[in-house]
Image: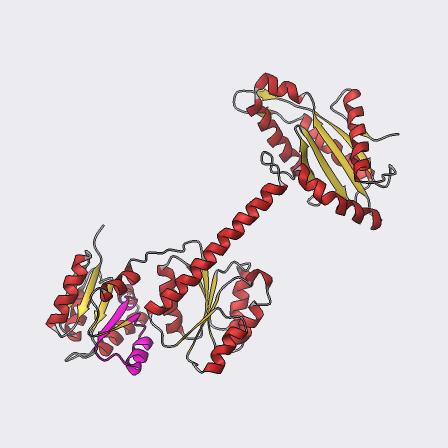
C-alpha cells in the first residue's frame, strides 16, 4: 500500500526540515513548498493530490489564508479533480495563534491549528488523528443538525473518518423527519443552537420526550458562549457543548468519548435482550418455552376470564417420535422438531402464543377465539404436518401429529391447570383413537 502524502507549506526552511523529518519517520511522503504561490502551482499538476496539507499563515507573495481560500473555492468547480482538492484536510501551523486567526481558519474549514513553537510529536499526533483514525465506529449513525453548510461539512468529514454513517438536516423540523424516517436508529446527534424554524433547544427538548432516544447523546455546537445559555443546553437534556469555532482535536476527543459510551450501551442492551430471549424461548425451535407459559398464563387467563373473552388451548404431540429418534438419530429428530415449529408458526395467527411444552409436545394458546376457530386451526396444522416430508439429504420421512383442545367458555374451566388438564385428556383420547387426529375435550 502506497504511503500517504503530506504537503508542508512554510517559508521557514527550518520548519520544513523539522516537519519533513517528523513525518518521514512515520512513513509519510512529504512534499515541501516554501510559499503559497509555489504550493498552488504544485497542486495544479499534482496527481494524486496530497492526503493532507499543513500551511503557515505568514508567508510572502501568498499567505496561508489566501492559499486555503484558493483551495476551498474549487468546491463549486465543475471539474471533479478540483472538487476533490477542495476537500483535502488542512492544518494551520503558525506563531500567530490567536482567536481572530482561529475564527478565520474555522470559516475556511481548517481542521486544526498548531501554534509555533510546537512540541515534538504534536504535529504527527494531529496528522495521525486525521489520516489514520485509530478508533472506528462502523455500523453507527450520526445526525448533524446545522444550517451552516461549511460547519456541517467539517463535522461530517470528522465523523466519516471514524466510520459513521452521516445524515444531515438544516433545521430541527427536518431533523425530526429524518429521525422518524430512520425509525429512531440514530447513535449521536450534533446540533446547532440557533436555526430557522425549530431551534436546537426545542429540538433537544422534543427528543428527550421520546423514550427510545433517551440514551442517545446530544452534542451542542454554538457561537453563543454565555454562561446562562450554556447551562440551558444541559437543562433541556444535552450531553455536551462546544463553542464555535472549534477544531478537530477537541471535537474529535469529545465525540469519541460519547460514541464509545453509546457503543458500550448498545452492546449491553443487545446482551440483555439476548438473555431475555433465551430465558423465554426454547433454544432448539425458537418458540416460547414452558417457563414463559407458566409466567404469563395466569395473567392471560385472568384477562380472558374477566374480560368475558374466550381462551382456547391446543396441545400437540408428534406421533411415535421416540421411534424417529431411535431409528434415525437425535440430529434428525431435532430437524423434525425445528421444521414442525415452522409449520405451526406459518399456519397460526400473529396473536397466537406458540410454545414447546417439552420434548415432542407443543402448546398453542388462542385468545378471543371460539372452539370452532381453534378446531379449524388444529385441522389445518394437522393436514400441513401430514403432508410434509422431512429431509436431511439422506433420510425422507413423514411424521403425523395428534392434538387435544380445551376451551374456557365451553368446558367449565376453573383455572389454568384445568385448562391444560382437559386439553391433555383430549390429546390422550386422540392417541387412543388412532393418532393423526384432533380431539376436543369431552366429559
**x then y, percent, for residue 152:** 40, 70
In percent of the image, x 18 and y 61: which residue is there?
Answer: 23
Residue farthest along the left direction in this orientation = 13
**x then y, percent, for residue 9:** 17, 71
Quick check: 292 above or below 226? above
Position of 274 with respect to 443 (left or right) is left
Count of all numbered marks drawn on residues in the image: 0
Residue farthest along the top direction in this orientation = 327
In percent of the image, x 49 and y 51: which residue is there?
Answer: 267
The color scheme shown is secondary structure
Q: Quadrant of the C terminus?
A: top right
**x then y, percent, for residue 66:** 23, 78
Q: Is residue 194 visible?
A: no
**x then y, percent, for residue 195:** 48, 77
Q: Is residue 436 visible?
A: yes
Q: Is residue 383 magenta?
A: no
In percent of the image, x 74 and y 32: which residue is there?
Answer: 315
Residues 347 and 263: in front is 263
Instruction: Identify the image quadrant of residue 327.
Output: top right
Quick check: 183 above or below 237? above
Position of 247 with respect to 281 (left or right) is left
Q: Is residue 108 magenta?
A: yes
Quick check: 309 above or below 132? above
Give the magenta-colored segment's residue range. 85-112
Amino acid at each position: 500500500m502506497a504511503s500517504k502524502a503530506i504537503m508542508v507549506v512554510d517559508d521557514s526552511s527550518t520548519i520544513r526540515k523539522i516537519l519533513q523529518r517528523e513525518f518521514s519517520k512515520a512513513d509519510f511522503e512529504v512534499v515541501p513548498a516554501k510559499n503559497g504561490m509555489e504550493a498552488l502551482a504544485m497542486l495544479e499538476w499534482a496527481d494524486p493530490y496530497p492526503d493532507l496539507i499543513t500551511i503557515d499563515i505568514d508567508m510572502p507573495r501568498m499567505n496561508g489564508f489566501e492559499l486555503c481560500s484558493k483551495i476551498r473555492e474549487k468546491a463549486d468547480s465543475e471539474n471533479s479533480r478540483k472538487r476533490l482538492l477542495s476537500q483535502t484536510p488542512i492544518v494551520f501551523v503558525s506563531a500567530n495563534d490567536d482567536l481572530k486567526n482561529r475564527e478565520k481558519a474555522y470559516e475556511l474549514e481548517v481542521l486544526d491549528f498548531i501554534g509555533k513553537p510546537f512540541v515534538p510529536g504534536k504535529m504527527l499526533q494531529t496528522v495521525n488523528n486525521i489520516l489514520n483514525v485509530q478508533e472506528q465506529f462502523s455500523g453507527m449513525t450520526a445526525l448533524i443538525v446545522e444550517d451552516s453548510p461549511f460547519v456541517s461539512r467539517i463535522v461530517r468529514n470528522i465523523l466519516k473518518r471514524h466510520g459513521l454513517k452521516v445524515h444531515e438536516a438544516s433545521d430541527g423540523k427536518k431533523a425530526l423527519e429524518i429521525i422518524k424516517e430512520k425509525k429512531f436508529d440514530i447513535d449521536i446527534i450534533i446540533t446547532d443552537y440557533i436555526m430557522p424554524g425549530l431551534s436546537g433547544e426545542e429540538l433537544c427538548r422534543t427528543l428527550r420526550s421520546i423514550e427510545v432516544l433517551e440514551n442517545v447523546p446530544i452534542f451542542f455546537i454554538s457561537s453563543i458562549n454565555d454562561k446562562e445559555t450554556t447551562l440551558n443546553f444541559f437543562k433541556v437534556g444535552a450531553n455536551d457543548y462546544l463553542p464555535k469555532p472549534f477544531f478537530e482535536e477537541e471535537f474529535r476527543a469529545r465525540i469519541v468519548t460519547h460514541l464509545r459510551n453509546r457503543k458500550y450501551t448498545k452492546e449491553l442492551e443487545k446482551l440483555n435482550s439476548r438473555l431475555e430471549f433465551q430465558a423465554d424461548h426454547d433454544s432448539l425451535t425458537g418458540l416460547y418455552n414452558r417457563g414463559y407459559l407458566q409466567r404469563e398464563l395466569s395473567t392471560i387467563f385472568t384477562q380472558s376470564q374477566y374480560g368475558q373473552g374466550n381462551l382456547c388451548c391446543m396441545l400437540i404431540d408428534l406421533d411415535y417420535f421416540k421411534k424417529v429418534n431411535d431409528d434415525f438419530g437425535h440430529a434428525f429428530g431435532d430437524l423434525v422438531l425445528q421444521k414442525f415449529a415452522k409449520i405451526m408458526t406459518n399456519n397460526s395467527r400473529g396473536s397466537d402464543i406458540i410454545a414447546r411444552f417439552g420434548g415432542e409436545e407443543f402448546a398453542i394458546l388462542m385468545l378471543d377465539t371460539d372452539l370452532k376457530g381453534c378446531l379449524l386451526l388444529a385441522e389445518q396444522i394437522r393436514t400441513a404436518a401430514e403432508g410434509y416430508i422431512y429431509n436431511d439429504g439422506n433420510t425422507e420421512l413423514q411424521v403425523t401429529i395428534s392434538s387435544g383442545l380445551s376451551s374456557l367458555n365451553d368446558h367449565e374451566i376453573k383455572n389454568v391447570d384445568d385448562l391444560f388438564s382437559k386439553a391433555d385428556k383430549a390429546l390422550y383420547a386422540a392417541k387412543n383413537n388412532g393418532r393423526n387426529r384432533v380431539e376436543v375435550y369431552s366429559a
